[in-house]
Image (tube, rainbow, N blue to C red):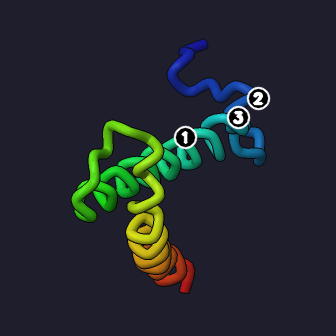
Amino acid sequence: MDSTYYTSPEELSPLPPRISYLKLYGIPLLLFLITFVTTTIAGTSWAGKSYWEITNWQYGITYSLLLMAFLSAHEFGHYFASLY
């Protein structure tokens, strides 16, 4: 029998393959945290403070939160547009 026409039971399964929670939630959360830290550093630099000292990062938090709010709203717009 030729194996090119044989279908294994795994290929006939109606369930999609399992995705680990790390790939599903871990990578997007890591990327969000990296973006938050880098925008905080950018806001600290924009405020004229040295971003090398973490105590100065308080000056960049407002910038970071506002920018992340705009980015989140923008990206959720793409998400909802793809659903509907």
First along the sequence among labels 3 and 1:
3
Picture residue at 47% right of the left edge, 45% below the top: 55
Q: In terms of image quadrants, where is residue 24?
A: top right
> What x and y, as percent, mark residue 34?
44, 44
| Residue 81 percent coordinates (x, y) | 47, 83
Query: Which mark, by number, is residue 7?
Result: none
Any part of residue 78 in sight: no
Point out the frontmost of discs 2 and 1. Answer: 1
Q: Is residue 5 above or below residue 64?
A: above
Residue 9: give its label.
2
Foreground: 56 or 37? 56
Find disc 3 in the rendering and name its residue.
20
Of the numbered discs 2 and 1, the one sitting upstream in the chain is 2
Residue placed most toward the observer, 16 or 58: 58
Could you tell me how far apart the alpha carbons at marks 2 and 1 are, in whole angstroms? 31 Å
**Residue located at (44% from left, 41% from top):** 54
